[in-house]
Image (cartoon, helix red, strand yellow):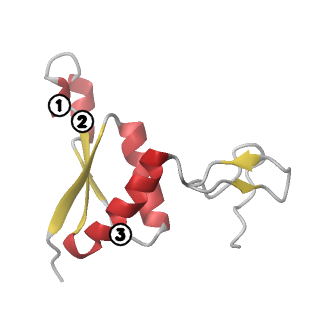
Amino acid sequence: MAFTWQSIYRAGNSLEAHTLKGLLEHAGLRVRLTGENLGSAAGELPADVVEVMLWVPAEETAQAQQLIASYEKGNLQGWRCRGCGELNEGPFDWCWQCGADRPDD
């Protein structure tokens, strides 16, 4: 089945794009990135050309935009690792300190 893809976000760099991609995929959304390979042309091309675009199927646009709005407002709920007690940011699935998986609850 073919999807109509909708551009939903222009990331400032590849790191931000992949962070958001992981957040959206964790919520069960399908995501495509475009423009990643243009980063090597930084300085040669205008900045707005080398930004990475996030795309989702059109029917998932509203949910994706809500998640991105929460990301931009910093409303993503963090979680505490059961292994080491470290506080981790909302979108991450494993503890940055000890590598333990995020609890499901």
Q: Is residue 2 above or below residue 75?
A: below
Q: Nearer the viewer, residue 16 or 77?
A: 77
Task: In the rendered structure, find residue 63 and report the number of the disc placed on it.
Answer: 3
Nearer the N terminus, badge 3 or badge 2? Answer: 2
Task: In the rendered structure, find residue 30 and report the number of the disc placed on it.
Answer: none
Q: What residue sits right under mark 2 in the picture?
A: 51
- The amino acid on which the numbered mark 3 sits, given as a three-letter code, is Gln
Q: Secondary structure at mark 2?
A: loop
Q: Residue furthest top?
A: 43
Name the residue at 20% across, 71% down: 58
Q: How far apart are labels 3 and 2 at the CA level?
A: 22 Å
Name the residue at 52% across, 46% down: 74
Q: Residue 65, how many percent across, how many down?
A: 33, 60
- The amino acid on which the numbered mark 2 sits, given as a three-letter code, is Glu
Task: In the rendered structure, find residue 48 and report the number of the disc placed on it.
Answer: 1
| Residue 14 figure quarter | top left
> Going by the image, does 19 lie left or right of 44?
right
Q: Residue 54, how many percent across, how many down?
A: 27, 52
> Going by the image, does 60 lie left or right of 26?
left
Q: Residue 97, how many percent across, how many down?
A: 75, 43
**Residue 93 in sight in this render:** yes
Name the residue at 17% across, 31% down: 48
Do residues under tags 2 and 1 come within 8 Å of each other at their CB atoms?
yes
Q: How far apart are labels 2 and 1 at the CA level?
A: 6 Å
Packing grade of label 1 (10 A; few <14, some 14-19, many >=20) is few
> Going by the image, does 9 lie left or right of 16?
left
Quarter of the image where the C terminus is located: bottom right
Quarter of the image where the N terminus is located: bottom left
- The amino acid on which the numbered mark 1 sits, given as a three-letter code, is Asp
Task: Point out the frontmost of discs 3 and 1.
Answer: 3
